[in-house]
Image: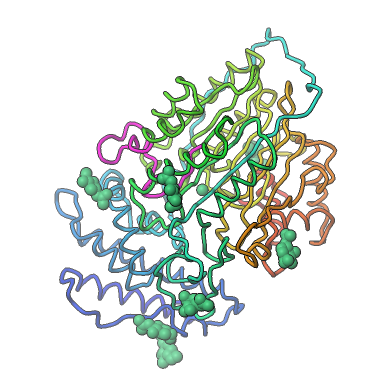
């Protein structure tokens, strides 16, 4: 098969490369061109994505093989690996895993923590490839997927009287939710929307792709984040449209140029955007949650016992300053230590902001000791136990959703699921972001998936990354019961907005209640809708078609949602445990 022939060719190349790598001036004698026409002649189903995945397989097997060999070759008796990262950069460039600038930037950004972990954990080649090139290579055999641990959850105190509250009459609270801004300060109208880097629409990029289009003023469908002026326009529009009782801001501020970021650029953006929010909402409480992109390198959130250069305190100390206008002293104290906090919003109503980076399966520090990092879930249980005893309601906010379709470690997610099940009367809603798509997740009491107990709303991103419209959302929350009774999602339709320079129109895309025909927004009502999608085997079935369009923020892919696509979306809703659908969790 052509596939295995290619593998052999690449493996031979890696061997040649390694044996000559000590002399870095050595010119390559043999270089396979993985982007050449050879690959596209491999006949499978002929789709572009398949060719891409074959390329990734090839790159990955060469990467694993090459690194196993390199680890053996570069290892010194004292356990260090001088020259290893230089080799990885060369390999990245030669195998065209990424563009030269991205290869250099990513490897040098990840060098410190990878070598720390390498000496502690004796990683093998496959594991390192997964760590450094996660989008190309799946890590195999990393221990974080195998570890089992449980956080103790106390039973409900039987003498506790249950607080039966009625929703307060009058108009509900208005809550604004903004997620995944990913502002690109280098955004340049007219630049290419598809380039050689993972993020495009920027100044001075290499473009070898023929069909690349050009970036538009307000944002672009492509591999692009959003310009500053689009975000400012959104905030000013949202502020003019109505008054909000409070704002949820669930993280990911920087653009996706993860290969060229620095601690200082991350801090600059946190300060800059805090200032911007204060400008448009000077008198509104804002409850932020920490994204996975705020760190440098991306996804790097060591637990607090990691000290010295790699310590995360450079970031948490900045959060303390940035979030100070909105949070009380005790909340600030846990932010400084761990990046999470809780605070009272109104009497009887509390918000818990989780640092979901301690469940992030791309946070390599979790390899060291993934057992409830920074005691976050233990802390959550204690906050919820105390809230329950006082009859408070709690909204949980965070960046990465605890869903199976996402990036949350399974063991962490299972513990979290158990906590929500135990405190289902106290936790009246959950809010996340990170996926950039418009989704929701139904929590169930057991694996029969018949007893829905809680809802998590996953807010679509402001960024267009990739191929979508900028968007934000508002929720209607009833006082006293602190339940969500409706939500409204707004988008900037870029097809329209980019035809004019001034006054782009942010429009209501849909309201949850009327679009999905919900009686109310309880988990039971969502479950009914969800079940109707599950039993409806035609892909065009009633509201599922609307869900599909909304999922993509009004800009769905041109191909229709086939059975695999539908199963994937449904699995994400049911927390990945819908055995009838063969979801992988
Ligand atoms: C790789 O192949 C493509 C298409 O055949 C060609 O345009 C490009 O110049 C080649 N690159 C190198 C480095 O040989
Ligand atoms: C790649 O394609 C070229 C011409 O298209 C051909 O000469 C060459 O043998 C191919 N290489 C492999 C490894 O298939
Ligand atoms: C790696 O860590 C050292 C301190 O241990 C620091 O001086 C150096 O700047 C770091 N390098 C990178 C690329 O982050
Ligand atoms: C569009 O982008 C390409 C590649 O960046 C550039 O060569 C071309 O001049 C641009 N076209 C316009 C109309 O700006
Ligand atoms: C934030 O960044 C924008 C865009 O670069 C700039 O115009 C503005 O002055 C900055 N604001 C602050 C407070 O740094
Ligand atoms: C998921 O499904 C499996 C198999 O049905 C079951 O054992 C497990 O308890 C379920 N987990 C949750 C969190 O519902
Ligand atoms: C966006 O605008 C285009 C062009 O007017 C239109 O075809 C499309 O339906 C609009 N999309 C949404 C979600 O409103
Ligand atoms: Zn994210």
Q: Look at the image and give the residue range highlighted in magenta.
A: 289-315
Where residue 144 sits: x, y (%)?
A: 44, 43
Would residue 225 be counted in the magenta stretch? no
Q: Residue at x 59, y 43 (%)?
A: 178
Q: Nearer the viewer, residue 219 or 10?
A: 219
Query: In this rendering, is residue 58 above or below 423?
Result: below
Percent of width and height locating residue 321: 40, 31
Q: Residue at x 60, y 79 (%)?
A: 46
- Count of residue discs: 0
Residue at position x 14%, y 51% in the image: 77
Identify the residue at horizontal 64%, vertical 21% (top origin): 349
The image quarter in which residue 24 lies: bottom left
Seen in the picture, residue 507 relative to 327 is either above or below; the reply is below
- Which residue is farthest front? 502
Q: Per the image, is 298 magenta?
A: yes
User: In the image, 250: left or right of 85?
Assistant: right
Q: Quadrant of ligand 6?
A: top right
**Image x and y of residue 188, in percent:** 47, 65
């Amino acid at each position: 098969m052509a596939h295995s022939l290619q593998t052999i060719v690449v493996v031979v190349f890696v061997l040649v490369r390694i044996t000559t790598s000590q002399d870095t001036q050595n010119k390559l004698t043999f270089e396979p061109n993985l982007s050449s026409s050879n690959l596209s002649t491999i006949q499978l189903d002929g789709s572009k994505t398949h060719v891409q995945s074959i390329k990734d397989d090839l790159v990955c097997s060469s990467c694993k093989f090459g690194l196993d060999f390199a680890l053996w070759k570069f290892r010194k008796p004292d356990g260090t690996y001088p020259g290893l990262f230089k080799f990885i950069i060369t390999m990245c460039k030669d195998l065209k895993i990424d563009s030269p600038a991205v290869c250099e930037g990513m490897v040098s950004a990840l060098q410190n923590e990878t070598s720390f972990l390498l000496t502690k954990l004796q990683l093998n080649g496959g594991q390192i490839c997964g760590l450094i090139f996660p989008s190309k290579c799946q890590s195999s055999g990393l221990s974080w997927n195998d570890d089992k641990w449980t956080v103790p959850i106390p039973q409900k105190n039987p003498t506790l009287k249950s607080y039966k509250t009625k929703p307060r009459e009058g108009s509900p609270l208005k809550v604004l939710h903004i997620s995944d801004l990913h502002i690109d300060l280098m955004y340049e109208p007219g630049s290419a929307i598809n380039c050689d880097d993972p993020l495009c629409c920027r100044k001075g990029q290499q473009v070898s792709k023929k069909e690349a289009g050009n970036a538009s003023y307000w944002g672009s469908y492509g591999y692009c984040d959003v310009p500053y002026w689009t975000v400012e326009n959104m905030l000013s529009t949202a502020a003019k449209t109505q008054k909000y009782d409070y704002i949820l801001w669930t993280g990911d501020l920087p653009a996706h140029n993860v290969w060229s970021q620095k601690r200082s650029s991350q801090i600059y953006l946190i300060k800059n955007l805090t200032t911007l929010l204060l400008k448009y909402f000077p008198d509104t409480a804002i409850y932020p949650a920490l994204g996975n992109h705020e760190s440098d390198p991306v996804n790097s959130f060591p637990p607090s016992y990691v000290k010295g250069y790699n310590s995360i305190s450079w970031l948490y100390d900045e959060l303390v300053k940035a979030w100070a206008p909105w949070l009380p002293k005790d909340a600030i104290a846990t932010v400084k230590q761990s990046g999470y906090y809780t605070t009272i919003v109104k009497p009887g109503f509390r918000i818990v902001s989780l640092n979901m980076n301690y469940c992030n399966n791309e946070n390599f520090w979790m390899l060291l000791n993934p057992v409830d990092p920074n005691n976050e879930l233990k802390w959550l249980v204690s906050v919820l136990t105390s809230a329950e005893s006082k009859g408070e309601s709690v909204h949980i906010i965070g960046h990465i959703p605890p869903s199976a379709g996402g990036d949350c470690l399974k063991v962490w997610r299972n513990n979290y699921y158990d906590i929500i099940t135990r405190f289902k009367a106290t936790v009246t809603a959950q809010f996340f972001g990170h996926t950039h798509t418009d989704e929701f997740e139904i929590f169930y009491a057991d694996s029969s998936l018949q007893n829905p107990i809680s809802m998590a709303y996953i807010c679509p991103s402001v960024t267009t990354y990739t191929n979508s419209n900028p968007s934000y959302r508002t929720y209607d929350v009833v006082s006293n019961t602190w339940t969500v009774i409706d939500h409204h999602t707004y988008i900037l339709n870029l097809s329209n907005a980019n035809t004019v320079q001034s006054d782009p129109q942010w429009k209501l895309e849909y309201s949850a209640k009327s679009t999905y025909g919900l009686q109310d927004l309880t988990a039971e009502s969502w479950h009914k809708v969800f079940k109707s999608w599950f039993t409806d085997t035609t892909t065009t079935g009633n509201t599922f078609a609307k869900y599909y369009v909304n999922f993509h923020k009004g800009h769905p892919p041109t191909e229709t949602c086939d059975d695999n696509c539908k199963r994937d979306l449904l699995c994400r809703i049911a927390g990945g445990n819908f055995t009838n659908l063969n979801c992988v969790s």
